[in-house]
């Protein structure tokens, strides 16, 4: 039972720390270019692989 309580407290602390980051306006986590986003790039600076694909006309 002690191990369960310690584990529960640690997980609770981690969740608390993540929520503090959201509360204080940390930017949202963003994905990378391509993937499940339908190919829409949300990156501010495109990587070499993305630039090459765009030059070939695949995006």
Image (cartoon, rainbow, N blue to C red):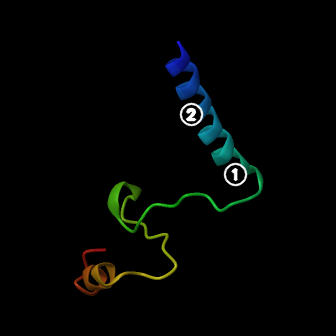
The image shows residue 48 at horizontal and vertical percentages of 31, 85
Q: Position of residue 50 (x, y in %)?
A: 32, 78
Residue found 64% across the figure and 38% down from its top: 13
From the top left corner, tell me how far across and down residue 15 is, in percent.
Answer: 62, 39
Q: Is residue 51 left or right of residue 20?
A: left
SS for dot 2: helix
Label 2 to label 1: alpha-carbon separation: 17 Å
Q: Which is more foreground, mark 2 or mark 1?
A: 2
* Residue 14 sits in quarter: top right
**Residue behind mark 2:** 11
Direction from residue 21 to residue 35 in the image, left or right: left
Count the marks. 2
- The reply to whether discs 2 and 1 touch (Cβ–Cβ < 8 Å) is no
Q: Which residue is mark 1?
A: 22
Q: Residue furthest top?
A: 1
Question: Could you tell me which secondary element the residue under label 1 belongs to?
Answer: helix
Residue beneath the point at 56% across and 33% down? 11
């Amino acid at each position: 039972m002690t191990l369960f309580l310690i584990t529960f407290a640690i997980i609770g602390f981690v969740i608390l720390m993540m929520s503090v980051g959201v509360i204080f306006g940390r930017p949202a986590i963003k994905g990378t270019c391509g993937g499940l986003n339908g190919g829409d790039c949300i990156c501010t600076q495109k990587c070499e692989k993305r630039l090459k694909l765009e030059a070939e006309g695949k995006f």
